[in-house]
């Protein structure tokens, strides 16, 4: 049996998130809520929050949510920016699990300033270690794909 692994565990080990003032407000199975204040150091050449920092906040919320299901890594992610964030804004990212299948998961994250949507993020995760057994899965072997009939369905796609 290995040590418990959840959203709070992965957040506690995330030096990048802490360095940028991201706070974990809530973590639950398949969900997480985080907060970040936009500082002057986060502004881009247009004087608005650099999209990379908004992505960092959303990605950190995604990491907390998907790691509540086991040790997980991102298989991919994308973001749509809906409105600019400004220096002094306090942003809240709410991550929510949409679906899990086999060792895969899909998570949506809304980044908000109050009630206004700043960005929508979708992350795709892959469990690489079962927290109950400590079993490690090699996602790099065979390009992350497995044979027909495995836990990924009849087509065997990751």
Image (spheres, helix red, strand yellow):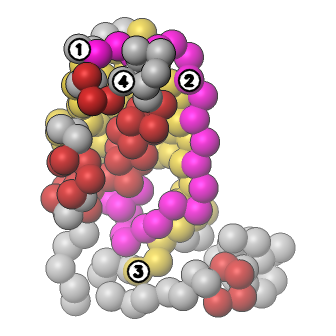
Please identify the quarter of the rendering in which residue 10 is found. Answer: bottom left
Q: Which residue is painted at 22% across and 85% down in the image?
A: 2
Q: Residue at x 41, y 80 (%)?
A: 129
Determine which residue is flagged by label 4.
Answer: 43
Corner quadrant of residue 25: top left
The disc placed on residue 88 is: 1
Q: CA distance from mark 1 to mark 2?
A: 18 Å
Q: Is residue 27 visible?
A: no
Q: Earlier in the sequence, mark 1 or mark 4?
A: 4
Q: Is residue 76 magenta?
A: yes
Q: Nearer the viewer, residue 47 or 12?
A: 47
Q: Which residues are magenta?
A: 66-87
Q: Where residue 129 is drawn, which disc sits there?
A: 3
Task: Indicate the position of residue 18 as horizontal and vertical percent values.
Answer: 18, 48
Residue linked to disc 2:
81
Q: Residue at x 28, y 16 (%)?
A: 87
Say whether disc 3 or disc 1 marks the residue closer to the N-terminus. Answer: 1
Specify few, some or many for label 2: CA neighbours under 10 Å numbering under 14, 14-19, or 20 or more.
Answer: some
Considering the image in quadrants, where does the C terminus appear?
bottom right
């Amino acid at each position: 049996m290995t040590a418990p692994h959840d959203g709070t565990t992965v957040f506690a080990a995330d030096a990048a998130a802490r360095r940028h003032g991201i706070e974990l407000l809530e973590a639950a199975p398949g969900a997480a809520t985080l907060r970040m204040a936009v500082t002057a150091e986060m502004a881009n050449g247009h004087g608005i929050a650099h999209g990379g920092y908004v992505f960092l906040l959303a990605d950190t919320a995604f990491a907390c949510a998907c790691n509540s299901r086991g040790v997980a890594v991102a298989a991919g992610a994308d973001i749509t920016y809906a409105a600019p964030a400004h220096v002094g804004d306090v942003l809240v990212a709410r991550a929510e699990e949409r679906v899990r299948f086999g060792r895969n998961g899909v998570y949506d994250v809304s980044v908000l300033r109050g009630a206004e949507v700043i960005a929508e993020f979708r992350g795709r995760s892959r469990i690489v270690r079962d927290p109950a057994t400590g079993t490690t899965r090699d996602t790099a072997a065979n390009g992350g794909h497995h044979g027909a009939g495995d836990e990924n369905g009849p087509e065997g796609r990751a």
